[in-house]
Amino acid sequence: MLNIINQIFEIEKKSKDQNLSIFERNFERIHHELEDLGYTINNPIGKIYDSRDTSLEVNLVGNSSRPVITKVLKPAIFQKDGGEMILLQKGIVIAE
């Protein structure tokens, strides 16, 4: 399932890069179905990187005191197990 989620993430990212908003509704439906299956996909693009966030592997560029995540290579993926969320995949990001 992780491979499928990663492929969906890549396709969504490429469609946004190409300004193809016609697929937005389809991606929303897919995300809704994944959430119904207990998966949560975290795309932290544009957020300030927090070094305490253990769900991310970060490559820091520059020496900013408050680096912002500028690129997400892989999203963090969680799955609900009972009452708790389990990290299935760490996100891989670049922050500047």
Image (cartoon, rainbow, N blue to C red):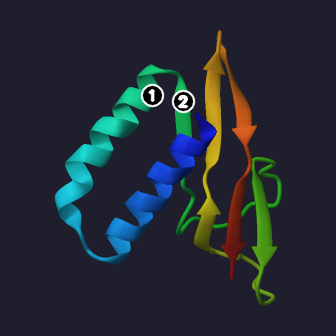
Task: Please say if the residues under marks 2 and 1 sit with CB atoms less than 8 Å apart.
Answer: yes
At 54% from the left edge and 55% from the top edge, which residue is drawn?
43
Report whether 32 appears left or right of 87. left
Q: Which is nearer the eye, 35 or 20?
A: 20
Q: Position of residue 77 (x, y in %)?
A: 63, 41
Q: Secondary structure at mark 1?
A: helix
Report whether 29 appears left or right of 39. left
Whether residue 17 can be seen here:
yes
The quadrant of the picture occupied by the N terminus is: top right
Report whether 10 appears left or right of 22. right
Q: Is residue 33 above or below residue 18?
A: above
Q: Position of residue 19 (x, y in %)?
A: 26, 74
Q: Which residue is mark 2?
A: 39
Q: Which mark is residue 35?
A: 1
Whether residue 42 can be seen here:
no
Kindly identify the amino acid type of the residue bearing the numbered disc 1.
Glu
Q: Position of residue 35 (x, y in %)?
A: 45, 28
Q: Secondary structure at mark 2?
A: strand
Farthest residue toward the bottom? 62
At 69% from the left edge and 82% from the top edge, which residue is drawn?
96
Task: Tell me how far mark 2 sits from mark 1, CA to CA.
Answer: 5 Å
Q: Which of the 4 quarters of the picture holds residue 3?
A: top right
Q: Which of the 4 quarters of the picture holds residue 71?
A: bottom right
Q: Is residue 53 above or below residue 77?
A: below
At 43% from the left edge and 65% from the top edge, which residue is drawn?
13
Q: Position of residue 33 (x, y in %)?
A: 37, 28
Q: Residues within 10 Å of mark 1 (few under 14, many from 20)?
A: some
Farthest residue toward the left? 22
Kindly identify the amino acid type of the residue bearing the numbered disc 2.
Tyr
At 69% from the left edge and 74% from the top edge, which residue is drawn?
94
